[in-house]
Amino acid sequence: MELEKVVVEFLKLHHLKLTTIESCTAGAMAARIVDVPGASEVFEQGFVTYSNEAKMRAVKVEAEILEKYGAVSKECAIEMAEGGIVVAKADVAVSITGFAGPSGGWEAPVGTVFIGCGLKGNLQVKEYHLAGGRSQVRDEAVNCALKQLYCYLSEHFKNL
């Protein structure tokens, strides 16, 4: 079974609403989720916050975070996820920010991606270093986000 289907079924089972906050993947994560029949029961809203201004305006990332750490950082991924949960009134968020290439990489090498996921007040961010061209990095970032989200939620609900 495709991972996006597993994630949607898990969210349905636990009556959770999901929001996605994407930069380098430009909505690809949201697209994978909504391709699953029945996703409307769990998918609340998706944000594509490609520019720093969009991150600040749409999901309330603080300018100071962007200035101090940059858009491609753990700190930014955390703020994106936290802001997405609040703005979308969702239970669960996934944020993706990184350098897909071919240019960029002034803050970190091309292929560096930070993925944040979790529930209100309990977020996890992981750093990935993905190889390949722009499309490959973006596709792999979505795959990583789906895996990370499923593992995170499974572990969280196992402990309840």
Image (cartoon, rainbow, N blue to C red):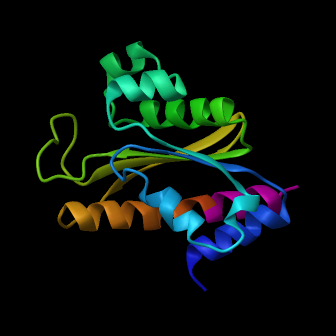
User: Is residue 154 part of the magenta span, yes or no?
Assistant: yes
Would you say 149 lies left or right of 157 here? left
Would you say 45 lies left or right of 13 here? left
Q: Is residue 147 visible?
A: no
Residue under the point 34% across and 26% down: 52
Look at the magenta stretch and give its main secondary structure: helix
Residue under the point 28% across and 62% down: 137
11 lies above or below 127: below
Residue under the point 58% across and 71% down: 4
Would you say 34 lies left or right of 76 here? right
State the quadrant of the C terminus.
Answer: bottom right
The x and y percentages for residue 45 are 61, 46
Q: Residue furthest right?
A: 160
State the quadrant of the N terminus.
Answer: bottom right
Q: Residue furthest left?
A: 103
84 lies above or below 2: above
The x and y percentages for residue 16 are 78, 53
Query: Which corner quadrant of the image does residue 6 belong to?
Result: bottom right
93 lies above or below 111: above
The x and y percentages for residue 134 are 20, 60
Looking at the rendering, the stretch of residues picked out in magenta corresponds to 150-160
User: Is residue 9 part of the magenta span, yes or no?
Assistant: no
Query: Which corner quadrant of the image does residue 35 belong to?
Result: bottom right
Q: Residue furthest top?
A: 64
Q: Is residue 156 visible?
A: yes
The x and y percentages for residue 8 are 69, 67
Query: Which corner quadrant of the image does residue 9 belong to?
Result: bottom right
89 lies above or below 113: above
Residue under the point 46% across and 37% down: 77
